[in-house]
Image: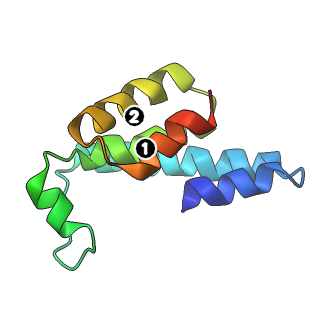
Amino acid sequence: MTYCSALSLEKPGQSAKAKKLLRDLLTYAQQLAKAKAKIDYFATSLPRMLLLDDNLQRRQEAPARLGLGRKVQAKKLLAIVLRRDPSHALTSDLLDSRK
């Protein structure tokens, strides 16, 4: 949701605020990467996480990198996520949205 919020701020000329949100998202994702990812057992996506080899850190870091213009890094992370879960709609959308 933070990624979408940042994108919505780019349109009305609030790019500084959008960049800050994306930098904060990237910082948060990097902090999460240092800790072992935990599955929230009340999450609606729990069945998918249990069936597929899901990497939560990559899924959290990729949108921030993409929004900050780090397309090469973001596309590598998104490709990894998509290889592990070809039906991950948000990943497909992100890859298509910022070509």
Whether residue 74 is visible: yes
Upstream in the sequence, badge 2 or badge 1?
Answer: 2
Instruction: Name the residue carrying label 2.
Output: 78
Tally of numbered discs: 2
Three-letter code for the amino acid on which mark 2 is drawn: Leu
- Picture disc at residue 91: 1
Bin the neighbour count of mark 2 within 10 Å (Cα to Cα): few under 14, some 14-19, many 20 and up: many
Q: Position of residue 47 (x, y in %)?
A: 15, 66
Left or right of residue 23: residue 12: right
Q: CA distance from mark 2 to mark 1?
A: 6 Å
Q: Identify the residue at horizontal 62%, vertical 57% (top origin).
A: 4
Give the vertical position of 59 relative to 9 (above or below): above
Q: Position of residue 12 (x, y in %)?
A: 89, 55
Whether residue 38 is visible: no
Hey, which residue is sitting farthest front in the picture? 87
Q: Nearer the viewer, residue 99 or 74?
A: 99
SS type, badge 2: helix
Q: Identify the residue at horizontal 74%, vertical 57% (top origin).
A: 8
Q: Quadrant of the C terminus?
A: top right
Give the vertical position of 37 relative to 67 (above or below): below
Bin the neighbour count of mark 1 within 10 Å (Cα to Cα): few under 14, some 14-19, many 20 and up: many
Q: Disc 2, disc 1: CB below 8 Å?
A: yes
Q: Position of residue 63 (x, y in %)?
A: 50, 43
Give the vertical position of 89 relative to 69 (above or below): below
Left or right of residue 47: residue 45: right
Left or right of residue 62: residue 86: left
Three-letter code for the amino acid on which mark 1 is drawn: Thr
Left or right of residue 7: residue 70: left
Q: Position of residue 1 (x, y in %)?
A: 54, 62
Q: Identify the residue at horizontal 23%, vertical 44% (top origin).
A: 55
Hey, which residue is sitting farthest top in the picture? 72
